[in-house]
């Protein structure tokens, strides 16, 4: 089988690339995804993300682990990643957040010309179908539906009010003129049409029925790519296993890797592209030495405080809570509204650790249920939680190989807290979060704290080292740029290799100050437009 473009990975970026490139009827495109079709009820019903995120069992989820982290008492971190069309947008909390505009200006400062805020904004708007309509900062006609929450719980407003008592202003739009403040999140969820209330994953947005039936687009699911086929310094296709058979898919123009911050560097290395020492350690011949492949891993380390609730209008897994969820499911099936449409993280805040900071450096996610170890420790009581993460960590980790076998998971080493500045900032954020959670507006709900400590700095530090983990925003392992550690150029083309491109969160040179799904979709929109010789708008 031969196509013009072969795209590996049907996640947030891969879905965009497949949709946009196949808009040209004269171009043939093959999209390859290791997981399923991404249309089952666990994905479509927002509340059922709780059944997938833990990875127990592994449903639509790679459920990766990190190597032991020395600064977290030797614990292995957990890294859920979506394994279905839609990728991690099929199992995330649906929060639509772009980050701070200065984040993108800094990409340009690092040598990524054309990736400043003014240059990327048109592609955010191009992707966005916001229920609020179009304005200078938002799009209304894009495929990715962005909705208001249909039934945020009263406790979410109480969190916003509690933040107000701590002099944190209300922000009605985290993607508006300012990022700082507390408010409800908008969500990537259908706000009109027959799918109203369902998750609008990248696959649901960009691979709708009409797109899937384009004669020039072939989508292979449950197909595991083993390596990129190289010939005389050029990528000519991929080897994969599909329906029990080994196959080669040829690419007449390009192979595009959109396998994510872990999968894309792994595939490059399995194909002989990466650091010479890493390849040699696994007996892989070097096709192109690129020292930066797998380096520059950045992620948002996250610390959670949870409370039992004195009120039952939050999530609980006891008999009363399960009856409430069943009633909510019935309402959702009828009209797509109600508590079954929840993102769980219904409210949040962006804070500055110090007034001298030029933008928020901390993010809070307020969750209307108890979250303990990524839902891998179940609590039956009604409760609520709040997360805090450092938005621009100094620590840099890496992704490598555990073996030369494609079926083996990559070696993930985020090096959490390896830079003490991250710990100091996370502790400041935890203190600010504590102040909000103990403010009067949350008094009617606040019961027993799940993991109390004596309040000292040493006790807080120990609790962070004992329980902190990812909030699922890994980026940077195939970073774009012009320096010696850059893996791709400013259009995602792999340095020194013809016909090979990387388009996903791995190309971010630096982690943005917010959630990463919307920026990943923007990256794919921008590069796909460049490949077709056009521009947004």
Image (cartoon, helix red, strand yellow):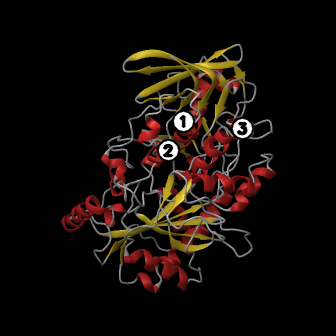
Disc ID at residue 495: none
| Residue 244 location (% of width, % of height) | 37, 18
- Position of 233 with respect to 54 (left or right) is right
Q: Name the residue under label 3.
A: 533
| Residue 385 location (% of width, % of height) | 42, 67
Residue 281's image quarter?
top right
- Position of 45 with respect to 16 (left or right) is left
Q: Mark 1 points at which residue?
A: 18
Between residue 448 and residue 273, name the one nearer to us: 273
| Residue 120 location (% of width, % of height) | 69, 53
> Alpha-carbon distance for marks 2 and 3?
20 Å
> Alpha-carbon distance for marks 2 and 1?
8 Å
Q: Please give the name of the residue rendered at 38% of the width and 63% of the height, measured from the top-left corner.
A: 342
Q: Please give the name of the residue rendered at 76% of the width and 55% of the height, measured from the top-left corner.
A: 106
Q: Please give the name of the residue rendered at 60% of the width and 41% of the height, measured from the top-left corner.
A: 504
Q: Mark 2 and mark 1 in contact? Answer it, CB < 8 Å.
A: yes
Question: Badge 3: how crowded within 10 Å, few (<14), some, or many (20+)?
Answer: few
For the residue labelled by badge 1, is the local secondary structure a helix, a strand or a loop? helix
> Alpha-carbon distance for marks 1 and 3?
16 Å
Between residue 96 and residue 392, name the one nearer to us: 96
Mark in front: 1 vs 3: 3
Q: Name the residue under label 2.
A: 206
Residue 412 appears in the rendering: no
| Residue 475 location (% of width, % of height) | 61, 45
């Amino acid at each position: 089988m031969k196509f013009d473009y072969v795209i590996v990975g049907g996640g947030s970026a891969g879905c965009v690339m497949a949709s946009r490139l196949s808009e040209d009827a004269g171009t043939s495109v093959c999209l390859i995804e290791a997981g399923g079709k991404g249309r089952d009820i666990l994905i479509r019903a927002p509340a059922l993300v709780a059944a997938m995120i833990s990875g127990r069992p592994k449903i639509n989820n790679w459920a990766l682990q990190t190597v032991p982290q020395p600064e977290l008492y030797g614990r292995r971190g957990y890294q859920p990643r979506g394994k279905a069309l839609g990728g991690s947008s099929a199992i995330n909390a649906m929060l639509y957040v772009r980050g701070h505009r200065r984040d993108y200006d800094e990409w340009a400062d690092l040598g990524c010309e054309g990736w400043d805020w003014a240059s990327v904004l048109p592609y955010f708007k191009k992707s966005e179908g916001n229920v609020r309509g179009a304005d200078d900062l938002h799009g209304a006609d894009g495929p990715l539906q962005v909705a208001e929450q249909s039934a945020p719980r009263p406790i979410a407003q109480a969190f916003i009010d509690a933040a107000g008592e701590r002099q944190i202003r209300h922000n009605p739009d985290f993607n508006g003129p300012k990022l700082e403040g507390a408010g409800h999140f908008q969500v990537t969820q259908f706000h009109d049409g027959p799918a109203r209330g369902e998750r609008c994953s990248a696959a649901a947005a960009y691979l709708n029925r009409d797109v899937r039936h384009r004669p020039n687009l072939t989508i292979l699911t449950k197909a595991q790519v083993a390596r990129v086929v190289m010939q005389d310094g050029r990528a000519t296709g991929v080897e994969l296993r599909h329906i029990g058979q080994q196959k080669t898919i040829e690419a007449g123009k390009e192979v595009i890797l959109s396998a994510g911050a872990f999968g894309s560097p792994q595939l490059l290395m399995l194909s002989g592209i990466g650091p010479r020492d890493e390849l040699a350690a696994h007996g892989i011949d070097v096709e192109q030495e690129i020292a930066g492949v797998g380096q520059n891993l950045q992620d948002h380390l996250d610390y959670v405080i949870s409370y039992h609730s004195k009120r039952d209008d939050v999530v609980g897994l006891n008999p009363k809570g399960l009856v409430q969820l069943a009633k909510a499911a019935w309402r959702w099936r009828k009209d797509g509204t109600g508590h079954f449409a929840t993102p769980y993280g219904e409210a949040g805040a962006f804070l500055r650790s110090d007034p001298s900071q030029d933008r928020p450096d901390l993010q809070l996610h307020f969750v209307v249920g108890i979250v303990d170890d990524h839902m891998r420790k179940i609590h039956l009581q009604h409760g609520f939680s709040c997360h805090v993460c450092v938005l621009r960590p100094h620590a840099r980790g890496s992704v490598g190989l555990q073996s030369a076998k494609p079926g083996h998971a990559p070696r993930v080493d985020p090096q959490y807290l390896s830079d003490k500045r991250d710990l100091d900032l996370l502790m400041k954020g935890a203190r600010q979060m504590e102040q909000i959670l103990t403010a009067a507006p949350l008094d009617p709900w606040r019961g027993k704290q799940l993991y109390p400590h004596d309040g000292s700095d040493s006790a807080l530090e120990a609790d962070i080292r004992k329980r902190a983990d990812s909030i699922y925003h890994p980026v940077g392992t195939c970073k774009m740029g012009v320096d010696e550690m850059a893996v791709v150029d400013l259009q995602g083309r792999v340095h020194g290799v013809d016909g090979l491109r990387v388009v996903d969160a791995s190309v971010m040179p630096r982690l943005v100050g917010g959630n990463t799904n919307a920026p990943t979709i923007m990256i794919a929109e921008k590069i796909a437009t460049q490949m077709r010789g056009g521009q947004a708008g």
